[in-house]
Image (cartoon, rainbow, N blue to C red):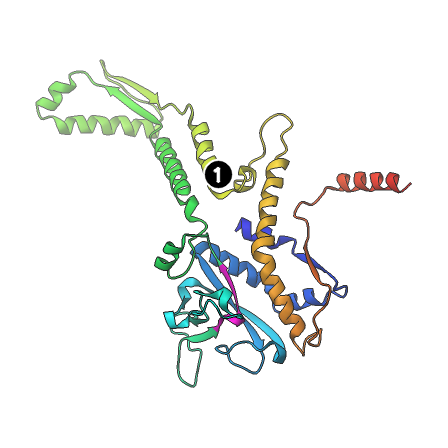
Amino acid sequence: ELPVRDMIRQWFEVEGDPDGRLLAEHKRINSKAKLADLFRWAWLYGGAIGVVGLDDGGSYEQTLRGEKLKTVSHIHIYDRHQLWWTTDDLYSDPDDPETGEFFGSPEFYTVTPYHGAVVDTATGSTQFRVHASRVLRVEGATTPEFYRYSNLGWGDSKYQAAYESVRAATAAFGAIENLIESFETATIKISNLVDIVASGRDVELKKRLEILDLGRHIINTLLLAEGEEFSKQSSSVAGLAELLDRTVERISIATGIPVTLLVGRAPAGLNATGASDIRFWYDNVKSLQTDELEPLLNKLHRWFMLAKSGPFGGKELKECTLKFNPLWQPTELEIVDLRNKQAQTDA
């Protein structure tokens, strides 16, 4: 959740659109939540698509005609397990001037919304086909080409790398739970125990242990006969805290999420603030915004502007730049200090 949430948390501004029409269009179709789902399922399963409702007079299966686009109405999200295609559905001409860059990728997706869902009441079909020109596509972790073929054309889950670390941490904490249950072990020394067992007086021995346990529960006192001794031994927990810290650090390394954010732990050490860890994390999130989120937003922005019934009347803005809002939010003291320095500079 954390990478996705931080990637869209502060959203963005658009320079060249002072009236905020693009942001209003995003709010109208709830694109912020939809894009979060798109990345959430794509990174979990290795791929997902967003089918965008583009009214150009054609069906989902037809190539988008941007010059006839009227409205952008919705985004529906489907993960890779709801999608399939055949080899006939792929872009097959690497020399085509318009589609050659998509060679080997799907031109058509067959979508199964969910089991038993009827998407065409006329035919009773539970599936529909959509052309790639109407789709926002996100993949998971990058994989070698030969692996993509065996994975039905998709990437791998981004969380596969962290799986073993999470499994090891789960095992470690489970072992601690078992240790707590057996933290103290009681020892009772009974005279002639070997003779009692050898003579078959098991019932007598069991009765004696029951009396000891009953007395301990009722009056918190043990009544011992002559020659009997009772003691307790505690298991050592030395080093367990450090061991558990290492398992958490292993997850942090595998996910790239600082421990301070992963488990909400306060930074340790003299003058430690955790600021450097958080800034490092925000730099990583910034790269995700630029590399993976921004191309999808630019695609949506073009459709918003081309829509003749939309606020732009089908005209694209000549100078339009997307700028993500800062993830690091300064404190009030930092803001005041910055203003003071700026005032001195101006003076």
Image mark count = 1
The reply to whether residue 288 is in sight is yes
Instruction: Please state if 152 lies on the left or on the right of 68 as rendered.
Output: left
Task: Indicate whether residue 199 is drawn in magenta.
Answer: no
Residue drawn 45% across the image and 54% down it: 44
Q: Position of residue 85 (x, y in %)?
A: 39, 69
The reply to whether residue 70 is in sight is no
Give the residue at mark 1.
253
Residue drawn 68% across the image and 64% down it: 23
Residue kind at label 1, given as amino acid type: Ile
Does 322 sit above or below residue 223? Answer: below
Q: Observer-nearest residue: 234 or 39?
A: 39
**Chain part drawn in magenta:** 131-138
Residue drawn 42% across the image and 25% down it: 239
Quadrant of the frame with the C terminus: top right
Q: Position of residue 93 (x, y in %)?
A: 45, 70
Kindly indicate the quadrant of the structure image that contains residue 162: top left
Q: Outermost residue, left direction?
A: 199
Q: Position of residue 240 (x, y in %)?
A: 42, 28
Residue drawn 63% across the image and 40% down it: 279
Q: Position of residue 26 (x, y in %)?
A: 64, 66
Q: Outermost residue, front direction?
A: 95
Instruction: Please state if 244 lies on the left or on the right of 97 as rendered.
Output: left
Q: Observer-nearest residue: 182 or 244?
A: 244
Q: Main secondary structure of the magenta part?
A: strand
Q: Secondary structure at mark 1?
A: helix
Kindly indicate the quadrant of the structure image that contains residue 149: bottom left
Does 258 sit above or below residue 22? Answer: above
Task: Indicate whether residue 135 is drawn in magenta.
Answer: yes
